[in-house]
């Protein structure tokens, strides 16, 4: 596996440090950061099996190199280790929050498989994005706040920062699937639509042009469907609407961070939001 950015544990540690006014996170908060990365990595292993992916960030996937069985077992092993580390924290509220992340990952995958009701596209998309991406950040940040002994209001600030940063991250990710390059992303562009998945740009196009909905319903399965959907995405200005959605979530994340004590860690949290919005991979 590629080392990657390890952004999720960094977020947890920065939130913990910021809420402490710049003091270093505790050992327990560090454990939450580790658990968040183990859960995330396990989800990548399982996702690559489900999606039959051959590459991730420019490298061969585990299932491509060693087969689906090894990839699934590898993900299961990481979840088992995460559960063991979580149990050792001996905090029932944190255990419940972090366990909910795994439930949400499954719910998000099921939402992706099943067709959404017409007219609820963007709403369902945001819910699915929360389950698949933002829940991990939100609940990990809140868990760090709980372990830091902070009051409920502060816990919710941590949750809101993680949730909105996660949603902004996912929306930008889906935008880059249309705007990015294969070399920068380390994977083919238009991967989602070619896999039959409708993300924010296509869903916004469908709001302006009802002709797009039948394409979504049949998962772009007929010859010319993908090209036709791309035509309507460009014609409708859907990429701009998607960028606006990402910016809205980013602004909410910054607002939550600004309620935290002023320190270097808080500045880093705000800068991280900007990096999410401006990233090209």
Image (spheres, helix red, strand yellow):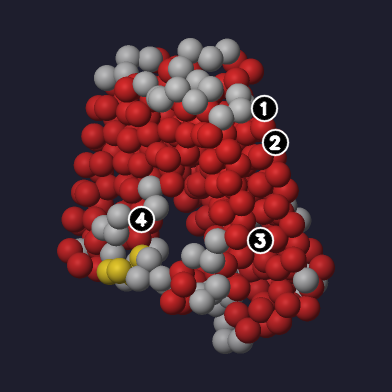
Q: Earlier in the sequence, mark 4 or mark 1?
A: 4
Q: Earlier in the sequence, mark 3 or mark 4?
A: 4
51 relative to 246, above or below: below
Percent position of residue 139, x then y? 50, 31
Determine the secondary structure under disc 3.
helix
Q: What distance separates the C-alpha of mark 1 from that of mark 2?
A: 7 Å
Q: What distance separates the C-alpha of mark 2 from that of mark 3?
A: 24 Å
Residue 163 visible in the current orientation: no
Q: Say the numbered circle drawn on residue 200.
A: 3
Q: Earlier in the sequence, mark 4 or mark 2?
A: 4
Q: What distance separates the C-alpha of mark 4 from that of mark 2?
A: 27 Å
174 relative to 276, above or below: below
Q: What residue is shown at x 70% (from left), y 68% (from top)?
A: 239
Disc 2 packing (10 Å; few <14; some 14–19; many ≥20): some
Q: What residue is shown at x 53% (from left), y 34% (from top)?
A: 264
Disc 1 vs disc 2: Cβ atoms closer than 8 Å? yes
Q: What distance separates the C-alpha of mark 3 from that of mark 1?
A: 30 Å
Q: Mark 1 sits on what residue?
A: 259
Q: Say the numbered circle drawn on residue 4.
A: 4
């Amino acid at each position: 596996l590629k080392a990657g950015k390890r952004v999720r544990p960094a977020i947890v540690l920065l939130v913990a440090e910021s809420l402490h006014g710049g003091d270093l996170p505790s050992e327990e908060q560090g454990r939450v950061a580790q658990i968040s990365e183990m859960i995330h990595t396990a989800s990548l292993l399982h996702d690559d099996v489900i999606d039959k992916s051959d590459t991730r960030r420019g490298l061969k996937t585990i299932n491509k190199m060693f087969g689906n069985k090894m990839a699934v077992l590898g993900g299961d092993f990481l979840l088992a280790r995460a559960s063991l580390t979580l149990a050792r924290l001996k905090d029932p509220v944190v255990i419940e929050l972090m366990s909910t992340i795994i439930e949400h990952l499954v719910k998000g995958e099921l939402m992706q498989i099943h067709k959404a009701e017409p007219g609820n596209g963007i709403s369902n998309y945001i819910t699915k994005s929360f389950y698949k991406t933002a829940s991990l950040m939100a609940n990990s940040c809140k868990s760090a706040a709980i372990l830091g002994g902070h009051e409920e209001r502060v816990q919710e600030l941590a949750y809101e920062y993680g949730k909105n940063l996660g949603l902004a991250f996912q929306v930008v990710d889906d935008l880059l699937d249309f705007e990015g390059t294969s070399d920068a992303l380390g994977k083919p562009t238009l991967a989602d639509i070619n896999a039959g998945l409708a993300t924010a740009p296509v869903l916004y196009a469908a709001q302006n042009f009802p002709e797009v909905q039948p394409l979504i319903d049949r998962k772009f399965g007929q010859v010319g469907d993908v090209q036709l959907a791309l035509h309507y995405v460009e014609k409708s200005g859907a990429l701009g609407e998607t960028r606006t959605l990402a910016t809205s979530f980013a602004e909410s994340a910054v607002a939550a961070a600004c309620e935290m004590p002023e320190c270097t860690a808080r500045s880093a949290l705000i800068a991280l939001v900007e990096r999410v919005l401006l990233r090209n991979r």
